[in-house]
Amino acid sequence: MTPHDFPVLEGGFNIRDLGGLPTQDGRVVRPGRLIRSGTLSDLTVRDVGALKSYGIEGIFDLRSTREQLAYPNPVIGKPVEPWRLPENEHVGEPGKLVERIGISPEHTHGVVCESYSAFPYAYKMAYRGVFATLARNQTPLIFHCAYGKDRTGIGAALVLSALGVTREAVTQDYMRSNDALEGFKERFLRDSHTAAARDLDPAIWYPVAIADPSYLDAMFDSIARRDGTIERYLEVEMGVDRAMQERLKDTLLVAA
């Protein structure tokens, strides 16, 4: 199986290889190294076997501790140092987001923008863990959250930015989560953590379901306000200096 033959998974959701995305220096992300995804708890035995055959070296779970315990991942590849929150914290959980909406679609949009602005800092240790795993060259790596759109989308944007992927390509990849919109809505209303949305007008919670470029803009704007540049953020907050960026590029990029 070559890196271009990423398996079709029966229980996969919003999962894709980031290979092929273009960088500012004319290279592309190496296929078969960076895989972003939604929940992996629905993978079948066949799916797990396919991912093992593909050579997955580990899974980095961006969900809260409570989510991880409620919907555990299968074991694929080598252990990855887990991201853990104190039991009384639930940063990033979709259920906590639902608790903050209910007024209007515009209000919901604003709440999501606020969340995206906070994530690069509230989730700093999680994203540091992703970079540390990549620095060990523990790839192919799957990194994921519940729906593969928000926490994963920001993680992908940060990693891709460190690799020099163009902002346009970062946004285009982010928007691909809308291809899984129907599955998102079905899971969102079924999940006990977000079931309160069933009592709301769908128009009010709909902004939670979509990948909107303004959300990603809110994240980058937050970084610009607090750190000035994405390069400064990567060095100060992620511990990724220029030398480490170059090492990551050497292993995760190829000629176009």
Image (tube, helix red, strand yellow):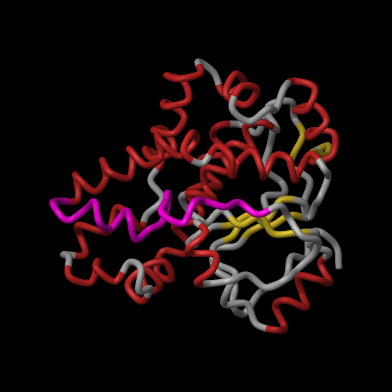
Main secondary structure along the magenta-highlighted residues: loop
Identity of the residue drawn at 52% across and 59% down: 65
Residue, x 78% and y 78% (percent of image)?
Answer: 49
For the residue pair 163 and 129, the one nearer the viewer reads as 129
Task: Look at 80% across and 71% down and name the residue there.
Answer: 52
Horizontal and vertical percent for residue 15?
60, 62
Query: In the shown orientation, is residue 80 left or right of residue 209?
Result: right
Q: In this view, does 25 lie to the left or right of 118?
A: right
Q: Determine which quarter of the picture holds residue 168.
A: top right
Whether residue 222 is in magenta: the answer is no
Look at the image and tell me whether residue 36 can be seen: no
Residue 35 % position (x, y): 68, 55
Q: Give the range drawn in magenta.
A: 82-104
Q: Residue at 80%, 64% (x, y): give it.
A: 77
Which quadrant of the figure contains the C terminus? top right
Answer left or right for 31 relative to 164: right
